[in-house]
Image (tube, coloured by chain):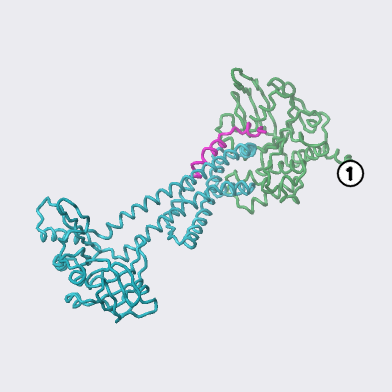
Amino acid sequence: MPTVISVKNLIKTYAVGEVEVRALRGVNLDVERGEFLAVTGPSGSGKSTFMHIVGCLDRPTSGQYFLDGQDVSRMSRDQLASIRNKKIGFVFQGFNLLSRTSALDNVELPLLYAGSGMKGPERHKRAMEVLKAVGLEDRADHHPNQLSGGQQQRVAIARSLINNPSILLADEPTGNLDTRTSIEVMDIFQRLNRERGITVLLITHEHDIAEYGTRMVQFRDGQVVMDRPIQRRRLAQDELVTLPAAQAV
Amino acid sequence: MSLLMIFRIALKAMGRNKMRTALTMLGMIIGVAAVITMVALGTGAQSSIEAQIQSAGTNVIIVSAGNFMAGGVRQGQGAASTLLPEDAAAIAPLPGVQYVAAGLNTRGQLVAGNQNWNTQVQGTDVDLPLIQAWQIERGAFFTPQDVTTAAKVAVIGSVVRDQLFGPDANPVGQVMRIQKQPFNIVGVLAAKGQTSMGQDRDDVVMVPYTTVMKKIRGVTFINNVTVSAASSNEVKVVADRIATLLRVRHRLQPGDPDDFMVRTIEEMASVRKEATQTMTALLASIAGVSLLVGGIGIMNIMLVSVTERTREIGLRMAIGARGRDVLLQFLVEAVVLSLFGGAIGIALGFGLSRGITFWMEWPTTVSTNAVAVAFGFAAATGVFFGFYPARKAAALDPIDALRYE
């Protein structure tokens, strides 16, 4: 399997007033295509900073980051914007959908910044395809306030998929969702990972959510302190079969 | 990303908050409408003055007698007795001169039957109707022979006709007394209406100037000579020729002041034109202030909007918007706001101008210049006041923006 993410001796320091905060103190990590990586760690461990750099939202103080073999650690802001648009799909805890905008328009949004000059009908078609992939094709014209939390997160996942990204970055995607909906969302991630081979990086502080991945990485004090494959992986698909009763209540 | 796309994004963003969009536009609408209406009022006043100059004849030159000094007491303009009928006769053959009419005025009590009226009695020559474009409604103007013989004939304006004979009467052939002397009425002038100064041009009686000289006032001089130049380009040259001629005829030494005055209609009107121009500028600048306030309103809303939509900006950046895209989006939003506001303001300004003309009967002219300037200013306001908020949005750090609560 080719390596999608390769991080070498990543260091990130912030100056907060007079104090220098060392958020990352030499992180080395390789992620192969098709992996489902769960990133855990307490708050302040550096996992968020790590995700921001992997997500090309921030640049490391030193060290290298190769995404699809391309060194992105020294790119300009505009170049990073283009990388984010084409190679990375983001899913956030708070969904971050545009209000008073239909699900379809929300999903299409990254296409507008792609600079491909894609025409309206083609954009709609692409957006409908990914909405179908998350099972929301019949909600395309609904606005976020007409959708449940789980549905909103599925719209956000559809949006992250529209440019066929190399990696999907999910930052606490189940943080605002109840148990059943969380499992439904994890089911979508697992299916995308399994069926399309999309590499997923999942940030979570919930240990049981981390177990949906194939590999777990734990951060502490700006370093990776644990990196192991998950032995008994949870499968959302199977769990959902046992849960329908809960929904009926 | 194409500009068209940015336009669509901006329009969508505006559509998401219609109330706020409408209120922001209102400032622009009022500002632009005010500018258009005020300028329309000013331009209207100016063009009505110009129209009057046109109707009075652009090529008219008026020579009037200068002031008269009697033992150190100056008597005021027109009192001098140095302007003579012979001067008028000498002006006529000058090159470029088309018509010449000597004039001597008096006021007098008019009596016809049991009615009487006091008005301006204008002693003039047969060329005056040609110079001032008077139409004859009934009868005819007096003839050159009437002038030579100082005949007691009169042509009356419609107001005089109404006062002495009634609107439907035909006074031609009837007798009217001026200063107790009987005059035959030979014609009635077609109505011309008021001047912009409120003077009624139809309240007039015209008689041969020789008659005023010999039969009414008993003088040998005249008050003025009304001259028309053959072409409006030559007015200034002809006026200078007349002045030179009169200095020679009056035997004035170099250094002596003129004992007459030569003015063109255009000169006389230019003072009033300047006054209206000042008024227009004043009105427009007051209206301009409201346009400025409208622009500040847009900046205010855009700043609030940037803060309120920080997370949206963060998200847009996360999914690939460059700083430039965000900057353009907010800039275009501001410009679209002001352009839409400007367009509606222009329509409203048109309506208001029409309304003012309709209800208040003030002349207004909406000039394309004013529309173009107002629209351009609206766009410039949008760019100017939209830039700071837009740059603020573009400079946001995506991580901070996404975390913003």
Could you tell me residue A228's position as x and y percent? 76, 25
Q: Quadrant of residue A2?
A: top right
User: Chain B is which colour?
Assistant: cyan
Residue B388 falls inside the magenta stretch: yes
Residue B193 falls inside the magenta stretch: no
Which secondary structure, mark 1? helix
Residue at coordinates 22% horizontally, 76% vertically from top-left? B152
B160 relative position to B290: left or right: left
A220 relative position to B282: left or right: right
- A112 shown above or below B155: above
- Indicate the quadrant containing the N terminus of chain B: top left, top right, bottom left or bottom right: top right
Residue at coordinates 48% horizontally, 63% vertically from top-left? B358
Q: Amino acid at mark 1?
A: Ala
The chain letter for the residue carrying disc 1 is: A
Q: Number of labelled discs?
A: 1
Q: Residues within 10 Å of mark 1 (few under 14, many from 20)?
A: few
**Main secondary structure type of the part rendered in magenta:** helix
Magenta-colored span: B381-405
Which one is in front, B158 or B190?
A: B158
Could you tell me residue B224's position as x and y percent? 21, 63
On the question of residue A21 being in view, the answer is: yes
- B353 shown above or below A143: below
Which residue, given by chain and number where applicable, does mark 1 sit on?
A: A248
Could you tell me residue A225's position as x and y percent? 73, 21
On the question of residue B51 being in view, the answer is: no
- Indicate the quadrant containing the C terminus of chain B: top left, top right, bottom left or bottom right: top right
B17 relative position to B161: left or right: right
A164 relative position to B86: left or right: right
Could you tell me residue B75's position as x and y percent? 20, 55
Report the chain shown in green: A
